Image: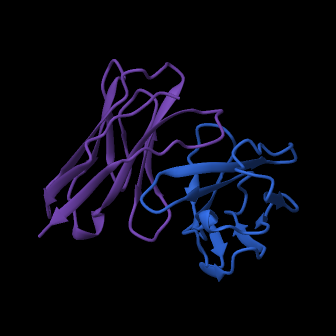
Chain colours: A blue, B purple
Amino acid sequence: GAGVSQSPSNKVTEKGKDVELRCDPISGHTALYWYRQSLGQGLEFLIYFQGNSAPDKSGLPSDRFSAERTGGSVSTLTIQRTQQEDSAVYLCASSLDPSEQPQHFGDGTRLSIL
Amino acid sequence: DAKTTQPPSMDCAEGRAANLPCNHSTISGNEYVYWYRQIHSQGPQYIIHGLKNNETNEMASLIITEDRKSSTLILPHATLRDTAVYYCIVRVAINNDMRFGAGTRLTVKP
């Protein structure tokens, strides 16, 4: 079946602009996660959604970052007033529920801030 | 979550078994062992996970020692396409995020 889909695959924008990144999770997966991966680095957790519960925003690096998940499916990560240090690959993952079931990742959005 | 230790790099001959070790000596009873791999410019790919029993699927086998302080991922017949960075992660099931370390860069050679 279809995996986690992210769009766009690449995004280049100027410093100070806002960007929106989209994630379509695997159908039926109730848990959705956003991570970012800087060049040569490990994954950094950003935010987690589970069903209708309040999201865990503990990983968001600043108030310029926000995310929403509409209808329990598609999620959008928004970065306002982008800075050069925001350049990274933003990865989305989904899983069946917050149990031992593994997270399945998309191929990410590569964000470059000029 | 418990910390994991993996060798930074390994080589394997094409067609041979690749055995990737992971130490997790501080693992607790409710923590699972997960293995992922990441090929350049792609997202992490789930391979296998387990709690205390050995596991096998179409991609690999996971061998967990009886004391659970270490594990080995086995790719039975490595191909060139198995060249990737392999991550061993220990995680409590109810935790929200996966903590990826530096992993092992496996290079499969012809």
Q: Camera-side residue: A74 or B1?
A: B1
Q: Quadrant of residue A7?
A: bottom right
In this picture, residue B13 sits left or right of residue A5: left
The quadrant in which the N terminus of chain A is found is bottom right
Q: Is residue B32 left or right of residue A13?
A: left
The answer to whether A101 is drawn above or below residue B75 in the figure is above
Q: Is residue B23 above or below residue B47?
A: above
Q: Residue at x 42, y 20 (%)?
A: B26
Nearer to the camera, A60 or B19: A60
* Rendering coords of residue A23 (x, y %): 70, 67
Q: Position of residue A12 (x, y in %)?
A: 63, 81
Residue A20, given in percent of the width and then of the height, sits at 76, 72
Could you tell me which residue is drawn at 80 percent across and 58 percent down? A66
Which quarter of the figure is the C terminus of chain A placed in?
bottom right
Q: Is residue B44 left or right of residue A8?
A: left
**Horizontal and vertical percent position of residue B40:** 39, 69
Q: Is residue A94 above or below residue B82?
A: above
